[in-house]
Image (spheres, rainbow, N blue to C red):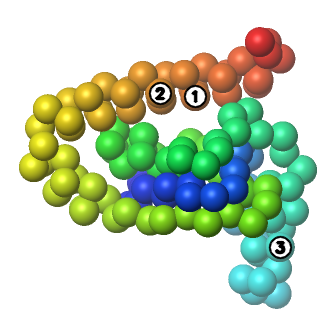
Amino acid sequence: YADRVHFIVQGEAGYSDVSLPEIERSMTHEGIQTHWFQVIRKLAQVEPFHVLEQGATVGELEVLLNVPRRFSCLTYARTEVMVLPKRDLLRILAEFPLVARKVYKRARDDYAVVKQANEDQSSGNTK
């Protein structure tokens, strides 16, 4: 489960549905460096189904909806991000309940859109 939200300050990133657990199972005795090389190589071969640009957020859906991460996110160029821990985000939203309701509604709506885009790509039904 997500424990922070990332804000893209500059650059871009993309969501993909690559399965990291299969890479983790294939780790060899060569260690973490080999593991991360495998992760990066696999992610670089996958076309993103949703591109995020400056001003976008990553991880807010999982933090707000308390759902496990379903997608991987990879930057494609030098990207600057700011990080907001989950506990701080929830504390801020608790202070502003009207804003919190809107934020949670948008998170649910956005999650449905991203999930549908992923399912469309998986079935070959791109729009």
> Which residue is tagged 3?
37
For label 3, count other residues whose C-alpha is less than 10 Å away and answer few (under 14), some (14-19) or many (20+). few
Indicate left or right for 12 with 110 as reference.
Answer: right
Q: Residue at x 89, y 50 (%)?
A: 45
Sequence-first disc among 2 and 3: 3
Under mark 3, the amino acid is Phe
Q: Nearer the viewer, mark 2 or mark 3?
A: 2
Is residue 116 visible in the rendered image? The answer is yes
Indicate left or right for 105 with 124 as reference.
Answer: left
> Which residue is tagged 1?
114
Task: Tell me how far mark 2 sits from mark 3, CA to CA.
Answer: 31 Å
- Callout 1 touching callout 2 (CB < 8 Å): yes
Task: Tell me how far mark 1 sits from mark 2, CA to CA.
Answer: 6 Å
Q: Which residue is drawn at 14% across and 32% down?
A: 98
Q: Is residue 11 above or below residue 67?
A: below
Task: Tell me how far mark 1 sits from mark 3, CA to CA.
Answer: 27 Å
Q: Position of residue 71 (x, y in %)?
A: 61, 44
Indicate left or right for 65 with 57 as reference.
Answer: left
Sequence-first disc among 1 and 3: 3
Q: Position of residue 40 (x, y in %)?
A: 80, 64
> Which residue is tagged 2?
110
User: Is 89 in front, or is 99?
Assistant: 99
Q: Is mark 1 on a helix, strand or loop?
A: helix
